[in-house]
Amino acid sequence: METQERLRQRMAALRASIVLHVRTSDPTQSSARATLDLLQDLVGIGSRVTIDTRVDGTEGVRIAIAAQGRRGPVTFWGTPSGYELEGLVSAIESAADIGPPLPENLREVASQIDRPLTADLYVAPT
């Protein structure tokens, strides 16, 4: 219950409305259903979070996060459970501009980036 309460506090602290854009080719597929159920639970905790689900040609499930009408750079593929749930919650906080502050030295490096960057990050429990 402590984890659930902490998650509730984090969702309550959101300063911006967040839309989770969910794309899948089949919302009745087990992984899509598990993802949608998990996100519905998250929405139930955070009143500033909504879900926009669309059926398209996406294989599996894809989640993109948008705040104030702008889609962020992070996309989740598959069900964000276990370790990935923390990543999803952190990405939501970041999109709502309440994530942990970036250290000054990293802000300086980031300010020198003059073009969009693409990076793939794969997470697997070990």
Image (tube, grey):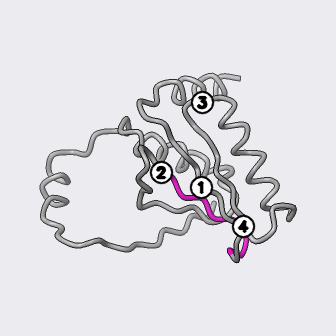
For label 2, the residue is 66
Question: Picture quarter containing residue 72?
Answer: bottom left
Q: Is residue 126 visible?
A: no
Q: Amino acid at mark 2?
A: Ala
For the record, the magenta segment spans: 58-66
* Mark 3 / mark 2, whichever is N-terminal: 3
| 62 over 107 or under it: above or below | below
Q: Residue at 12% of width from left, 55% of height from top?
A: 108
- SS class, disc 1: strand
Horizontal placement of 29 versus 10: left or right? Answer: right
Type of secondary structure dominating the magenta stretch: strand
For label 4, the residue is 24
Task: Give the Cα separation between the discs numbered 1 and 4.
Answer: 10 Å
Position in image of residue 100 (x %, y %): 34, 38
Q: Are marks 1 and 4 in contact (CB under 8 Å)?
A: no
Crowding at dot 2, Cα within 10 Å, few <14 / some 14-19 / many 20+, comes out as many
* Mark 3 / mark 1, whichever is N-terminal: 1
Q: Residue at 60% of width from left, 59% of height from top?
A: 63
Q: Amino acid at mark 4?
A: Thr
Q: Residue at 71% of width from left, 76% of height from top?
A: 59
For label 3, the residue is 46
Front in this rendered view, residue 109 or 91? 91
Q: Nearer the viewer, mark 3 or mark 1?
A: 1
Crowding at dot 3, Cα within 10 Å, few <14 / some 14-19 / many 20+, comes out as many
For label 1, the residue is 21
Position in image of residue 86 (x %, y %): 56, 45
Q: Are marks 1 and 2 in contact (CB under 8 Å)?
A: yes
Q: Amino acid at mark 1?
A: His
Crowding at dot 1, Cα within 10 Å, few <14 / some 14-19 / many 20+, comes out as some
Front in this rendered view, residue 106 or 88? 88
Task: Give the Cα separation between the discs numbered 1 and 2.
Answer: 7 Å
